[in-house]
Amino acid sequence: MKKTTLAIFFIILLSFTVGIYFYPRMPEMVVSHWNGKGEADGYMTKFWGLFLMPIISMVMALLFLTIPKIDPLKENVKKFRKYFDMFIVLILLFFFYLYLLTIFWNLGIKFNFIFAIVPSFAVLFYYIGVLTEHSERNWFIGIRNPWTMSSETVWKKTHKLGGQLFKLSAVISLAGMFFGKYAIYFIIVPVIFTALYTNFYSYFEYKKEK
């Protein structure tokens, strides 16, 4: 078994272990959601508040590990598999970090939730940029639309640009820490722009090629 696969299962096991350990110390209703200002505005029962995130992480991990086996272009996935495996580890660490923040808050340790998650989003966005730049044409990972899937050239151009934009989004999201209650917009807006722009870009590149 690969080291990354072991790391994936270790993170999931650790998440459930943490939930079991802190279960007796949690209130019957736990805070589970924060608004854009970092204020708590949603609650769950203790069980789901502690175990929903580990369950989601487990399902996501199984899904991600299945993708390389069922993709019709699995040979292409093999070419960047090491980057994809690291992405799985990183996304699970991202969820585990959010999970710990939720537990700390419900233990009475108060902090600005938005500021606490900004650096983790920056790291995630930057690595998505790395993965995007290295991805080869496939059906599950990357910027997949009729134009990138129809042309190897358009795929490569779009993913090179998309990788750069995701890395830029990481930098912009960090800058949001200096803008108080507007920090959440520095996370959301660049990613939405990247998604929209790369799709329009791929369309026009395809039309140009044809």
Image (cartoon, rainbow, N blue to C red):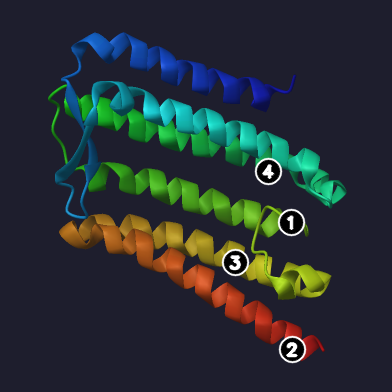
Instruction: Find out whether the residues at labels 1 and 4 contact each other: C-beta distance under 8 Å.
Output: no
In the picture of the structure, the residue carrying the numbered disc 4 is 83
Q: Label 1: which residue? A: 139
Q: Earlier in the sequence, mark 1 or mark 4?
A: 4
How far apart are the alpha carbons under marks 2 and 3?
Answer: 18 Å
Query: As drawn, is 41 to the left or to the right of 79?
Result: left
What number is the disc on residue 162?
Answer: 3
Q: CA distance from mark 1 to mark 4?
A: 16 Å
Q: Quadrant of the N terminus?
A: top right
Q: In the picture shown, does residue 27 fall above or below 204? A: above
Whether residue 193 sits left or right of residue 29 in the image: it is: right
Q: Which mark is residue 207?
A: 2
Front residue of 49/82: it is 49
| Cα gap from disc 4 to disc 3, whole angstroms | 16 Å
Check the image and report above or below for 90 versus 209: above
Q: Earlier in the sequence, mark 2 or mark 3?
A: 3
Task: Report if the CB atoms under discs 2 and 3 are less than 8 Å apart.
Answer: no
In this rendering, position of residue 170 left or right of residue 71? left
Three-letter amino acid code at disc 3? Gly
